[in-house]
């Protein structure tokens, strides 16, 4: 199509939608002085302040969560299944609250202030946890034999639950906002991300791995060999210092103003579509309602264009006489723009892919409960005088991530780029699929290693001695930790990048919250699976006994989880095969030029000032 004809079509559409004011607004917004001021904010220099907050959150949560099964069973004397379910429920709640934080950030508070308030609440929760661990009155008498132990009282448990609730609420403000706030400091458009030699999400996850490594070594050691008061007090102090550092860097940040509640916009589209359920949509999608001025604040980096999926929702963008008042303002509960309709369509398309991560989380929850209990029964000596702590075994997954992410970026991506021709080697969907496949083998390894551990216990007549050390090295658990870490490099990082990239820009905090909600639902499903297996496998020969893991059949539970993961892998591959990427027109800032493109990026329009606007319909590869 020629430039002149496209220019005429563009001017006609601008005139039809009453968007001449927006054209002037965009010109003012993209004035060189304004662009220079905007470019002075953000960038790599903001990362120490932003990531310090997230690193300390991960440091605190990893140090607490990694050894919590020990605290609940060895200090509070809870039965194994009750402790495992308490741990899963806490993890689930901590991962569900980000939806609340995302709503607050995207609607009115903005990401910066949501992170600040969330961090304050988190610090308060950590202080409460530290006090509960330090005061003898808040825990039952010690029970070193783990026989006929006195469980924690209701008061002692409620103090713990209050602390966990505060940390969960604080996490809700931190987790959905930090990664998106950090990504906001960079140009995350397609052309920029593909031309970079590094991937932001890889390095974000790398920093989280470093925090987990410190927690699993230093903090867990202090908790087990010094005291729980200091073991929880150190992460509390670190979290408080990170909050100060984050606030100190405020003048450097690029802050995206909140764009109004995305949930209200979704509701408006649904209501408008329902009201017009009997309306026949136009054959030409260009006849649907568009208003660039109305959508300017929610499409600063690009505008979503019409797609052929979920056409029933297009009725919300069909213009009727009663939809626009005398001042040419639309009634948003009766009429939605194409961009707002496509926001809802985009989120609907995401959900099947997102849901596949839920069962993966459920299948991995044993790493923080049963696997630690397995490690406690095995020979953990590195030397005659030093032995590794059970909760520290997770370090092998963390080390795999820390070592694997740079290798992925420096070796795997260039090799894959040569084989596939894709700018980033493999797409997000392919990366996630590889992770799902690896995780199946990780669970198979868990089952085989448990069979070997029990065989060693039987050979030495230790099946009825739950506190005895079985003469088998704890390092037999390393292969499953390695495979889980490798799966995380592919699946978790790919999942986070996929949600950020494919979500509407005004809903990115919500999309980040979905990442954590998948973890929440996965933990709840894990609780359900453990409870059902424990209940229905009988008192004798129970797969998951309360006290003596040697007499259980944990390997059967692992085989069950393996079968579920195979089904989940088939489901994911099916969803990924039929997935269609979001169609978007992106604005690219290239020197003094600002280019709007979608798909193959061929320019369609050029004004007399040298600025370019490219208007194509297509979709990005994921």
Image: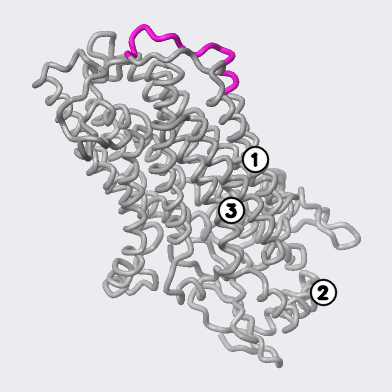
Whether residue 148 is in magenta: the answer is yes
- Most extreme residue toward the right is 326
Depth-wise, is mark 3 or mark 1 nearer the camera?
Answer: 3
Q: Secondary structure at mark 2?
A: helix
Residue 310 picture location, percent across and down = 55, 52
Q: CA distance from mark 2 to mark 1?
A: 35 Å
Q: Residue at x 29, y 66 (%)?
A: 412
| Local crowd size for mark 1, using a 10 Å CA cut-off: few (<14), some (14–19), many (≥20) | some
**Residue contact between numbered discs 2 and 1, judged by CB atoms under 8 Å:** no
Q: Secondary structure at mark 1?
A: helix
List the residue tagged with mark 3: 178
Location of the C terminus (image quadrant): bottom left
Q: Residue at x 38, y 33 (%)?
A: 368
**Residue contact between numbered discs 3 and 1, judged by CB atoms under 8 Å:** no
Location of the N terminus (image quadrant): bottom right
| Residue 444 is at least partly visible in this image | no
Q: Nearer the viewer, residue 225 or 190?
A: 225
Task: Identify the disc placed on residue 21.
Answer: 2
276 horizontally vs 83: left or right: right
Residue 597 picture location, percent across and down = 57, 76
Mark 3 vs 2, N-terminal side: 2
Task: Identify the disc placed on residue 405.
Answer: none
Mark 3 vs 1, N-terminal side: 1
Residue 451 picture location, percent across and down = 16, 28
| Residue 368 is at least partly visible in this image | yes
Mark 2 vs 1, N-terminal side: 2
Task: Identify the disc placed on residue 100.
Answer: 1
Residue 120, quarter of picture: top right
User: What's drawn in magenta, residue-wise?
Assistant: 145-160
């Amino acid at each position: 199509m020629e430039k002149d004809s496209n220019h005429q079509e563009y001017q006609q559409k601008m005139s039809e939608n009453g968007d001449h004011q927006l054209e002037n607004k965009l010109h003012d917004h993209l004035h060189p002085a304004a662009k220079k001021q905007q470019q002075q904010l953000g960038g790599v220099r903001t990362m120490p302040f932003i990531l310090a907050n997230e690193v300390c959150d991960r440091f605190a949560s990893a140090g607490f969560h990694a050894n919590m099964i020990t605290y609940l069973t060895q200090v509070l004397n809870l039965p194994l299944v009750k402790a495992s379910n308490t741990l899963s429920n806490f993890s689930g709640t901590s991962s569900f609250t980000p939806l609340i934080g995302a709503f607050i950030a995207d609607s009115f508070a903005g990401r910066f202030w949501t992170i600040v308030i969330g961090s304050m609440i988190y610090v308060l929760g950590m202080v409460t946890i530290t006090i509960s661990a330090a005061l003898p009155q808040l825990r039952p008498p010690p029970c070193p034999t783990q026989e006929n132990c006195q469980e924690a009282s209701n008061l002692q448990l409620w103090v713990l639950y209050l602390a966990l609730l505060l940390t969960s609420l604080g996490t809700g403000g931190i987790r959905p906002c930090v990664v998106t706030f950090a990504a906001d400091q960079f140009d995350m458009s397609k052309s920029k991300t593909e031309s970079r030699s590094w991937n932001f999400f890889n390095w974000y996850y790398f920093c989280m791995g470093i925090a987990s490594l410190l927690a699993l070594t230093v903090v867990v050691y202090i908790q087990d060999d010094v005291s729980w008061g200091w073991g929880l007090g150190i992460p509390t102090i670190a979290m408080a210092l990170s909050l100060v550092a984050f606030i100190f860097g405020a003048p450097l940040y690029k802050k995206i103003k909140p764009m109004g509640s995305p949930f209200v916009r979704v509701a408006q589209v649904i209501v408008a579509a329902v009201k017009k359920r009997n309306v026949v949509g136009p054959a030409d999608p260009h006849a649907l309602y568009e208003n660039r001025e109305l959508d300017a604040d929610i499409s600063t980096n690009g505008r979503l264009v019409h797609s052929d999926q979920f056409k029933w929702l297009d009725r919300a963008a069909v213009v009727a006489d009663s939809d626009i008042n005398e001042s040419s303002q639309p009634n948003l509960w009766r009429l939605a723009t194409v961009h707002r309709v496509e926001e809802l369509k985009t989120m609907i398309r995401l959900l099947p892919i997102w849901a596949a991560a839920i069962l993966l989380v459920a299948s991995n929850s044993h790493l923080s409960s049963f696997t630690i209990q397995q490690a406690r029964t095995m020979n953990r000596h590195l030397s005659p005088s030093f032995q590794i702590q059970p909760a520290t075994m997770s370090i092998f997954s963390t080390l795999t991530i820390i070592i694997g992410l740079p290798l992925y970026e420096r070796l795997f991506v260039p090799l894959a780029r040569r084989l596939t021709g894709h700018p980033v080697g493999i797409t997000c969907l392919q990366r996630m699929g590889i992770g799902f496949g690896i995780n199946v083998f990780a669970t198979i390894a868990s089952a085989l290693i448990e069979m070997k551990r029990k065989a060693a216990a039987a050979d030495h007549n230790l099946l009825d001695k739950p506190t005895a050390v079985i003469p088998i090295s704890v390092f037999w658990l390393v292969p499953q930790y390695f495979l889980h870490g490798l799966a995380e490099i592919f699946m978790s990082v790919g999942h986070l990048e996929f949600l950020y990239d494919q979500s509407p820009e005004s809903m990115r905090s919500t999309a980040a919250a979905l990442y954590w909600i998948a973890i929440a639902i996965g933990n709840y499903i894990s609780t359900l699976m453990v409870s059902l297996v424990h209940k229905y496998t009988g008192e004798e020969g129970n797969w998951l006994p309360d006290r003596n893991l040697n007499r259980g059949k944990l390997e059967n539970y692992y085989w069950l989880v393996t079968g579920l993961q195979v089904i989940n892998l088939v489901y994911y591959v099916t969803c990924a095969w039929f997935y269609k990427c979001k169609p978007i027109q992106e604005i690219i800032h290239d020197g003094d030029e600002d280019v709007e493109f979608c798909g193959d990026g061929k320019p369609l329009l050029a004004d007399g000032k040298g600025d370019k606007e490219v208007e194509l319909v297509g979709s990005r590869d994921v």
